[in-house]
Amino acid sequence: MGRFYLTTPIYYVNDAPHVGHAYCTVNADALARWHRLSGDSTKFLTGTDEHGQKVADAAVKNGVDPQTWTDQTSRRFREAWDALDISYDDFIRTTEPRHTETVQKFLTAIYENGYLYKDVYSGLYCVSCEDYFTLEASDEGQCPIHHRPLTEMSEENWFFRLSAFEDRLLEYYEEHPGFVTPETKRNEAVSFVKGGLRDISITRTSIDWGIPVPWDPGHVFYVWYDALINYLTAIGYGRDDDQVEEWWPASHHLIGKEIIRFHCVWWPAMCMAAGLDPVSHVQVHGWLLVGGQKLSKTMAAEGGVRLTDIAPVVLTDEFGVDPLRYYLVRETALGNDGEFSHEGITARYNTDLANNLGNLVARVSTVVGAKCDAQSLIPGRDTELRTEAERAIDLARRAWERFAPSQALEATWGLIGATNAYLERHAPWKMESGKELDAVMADALESIRLVSILISPVMPSVAQEIWRRLTLEGSPTDSPQDESLVWGLYRARGPLSKGEPLFPRIRSDE
Ligand code: MSP
């Protein structure tokens, strides 16, 4: 049993949450739930990134002041996460006083260590990215991500000597091969550093919607510089050293692939400059695409995707909370890009949930309800299903440990498939009541008990409902998984009955 500190990126509050944000947050939630189930002392952090030009512009456009705007939009993120049953332990907002305090302390440490200097910056800027581009890195003067014209900016700023960290960063990558996963994304970060690092401008005078620079009034910190530090705010940096000691640096950031440079280059260098060890692990994920395009407010504004139709809360109404969570985790493994579509979610729902899992629970409950005394059923010792179950548990455990929740589900569905095949072979619906039937059904029930624990990080309510239908005591997450994911523990507390379908089929024309 250990400690597990996991963070999502903090989301910009220029607009409402969309299913791309949900993809990251749900996967993180599943990982956090798995680690809690493993008995790890767990801290799961998410939140909102509220400063910067983009958010200030959104407030003006909506005719309110930035604080009112961020209050409203940050609330929409919390509402979406509540609707998706996200079990975050802390929700950070970068406009909170605790964050200002940590940012100012952290950056003052960097300043005092001699890594900041003042200079004039001129460059091409994309407000949607809140990032500068060189002409070469741009798409003929347009942002390569948002395909909009970049604007020329020039101001006197404080600069961070990122260039001083090239060797130390490469050394850090070398000594910590697991720092960035998957490997392809690690290589991306390494080649970025090898390509040569330029110092970065970290303050602004052109806007005032940001955290004031303590040693130079009139400057506020650049939004990315304040945002990255949120991971330390939540564990009390500059306010509670014991807590930092407890959670840092053995922590995990789950991030999307377009923000690798910030998290895998800037952030470790910032930590080094402040005299702190960098975070030990960054897990990168790809994008959910719709019609081949990354979801974003900016894209939606250009036509095509109607973000409101696929808002997380709309989708939970349509498919249910746990089915949506299942689809987001199962369909697109962390690291890959995936396509989000109604057809895709409907297909997963009907096949994996209704046909495989739902049908398994229904047929077992029906036979046991009609032909067995459930309370006398005890799983067998050395049976064919036991071997299948132990194999699946082992695969799933290893998948969770290497940040591969989709594969953990794949292994679990392997067990569901094996149990359905086992039932087909024995055809208990044709058998007479008696010892032989009892033996078949006790093993099938035990397999379902294990499945219910294995799915609980992704489908907590469904797992609980299956547990209840099996008439088991308490809930699937009451004991640590190394005690509960052990063959042979099924004991019914009452008779079983067929019950309503767990996943009523969705017709494809609906
Ligand atoms: N505010 C910064 C992060 C600061 S973290 C210190 C930011 N915000 S964001 O709202 O634009 O994006 C937050 C995360 O959402 C990113 O990791 C991004 O990859 C993810 N996603 C946004 N759209 C996405 C998809 N369409 N698919 C999957 N994830 C995507 O960047």
Image: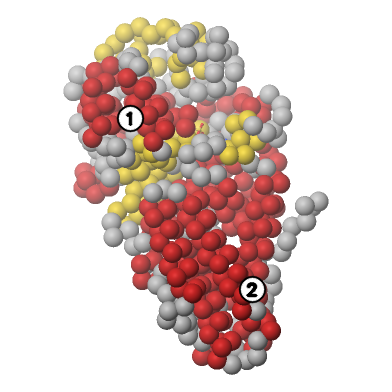
Q: CA distance from mark 1 to mark 2?
A: 54 Å
Q: Quadrant of the N terminus?
A: bottom left
Which residue lies at the image location 52% right of the left edge and 20% below the top edge?
A: 127
Q: Nearer the viewer, residue 508 or 69?
A: 508
Which residue lies at the image location 47% right of the left edge and 13% below the top edge?
A: 137
- Nearest to N terminus: mark 1 or mark 2: 1
| Residue 2: percent from left, percent from top | 28, 56
Residue of label 2: 424
- Numbered disc 2: secondary structure: helix
Ligand 1: does it lie within 8 Å of the C-beta at label 1? no
Reply above or below: 180 against 61.
below
Please indicate whether residue 197 sits to the left or right of residue 340 in the image: left
| Residue 374: percent from left, percent from top | 56, 87
Q: Amino acid at mark 1?
A: Trp
Please indicate whether residue 66 sits to the left or right of residue 176 in the image: right
The quadrant holding residue 191 is: top left
Q: Nearer the viewer, residue 68 or 191?
A: 191
Q: Is residue 233 visible?
A: no
- Numbered disc 1: secondary structure: helix
Residue of label 1: 267
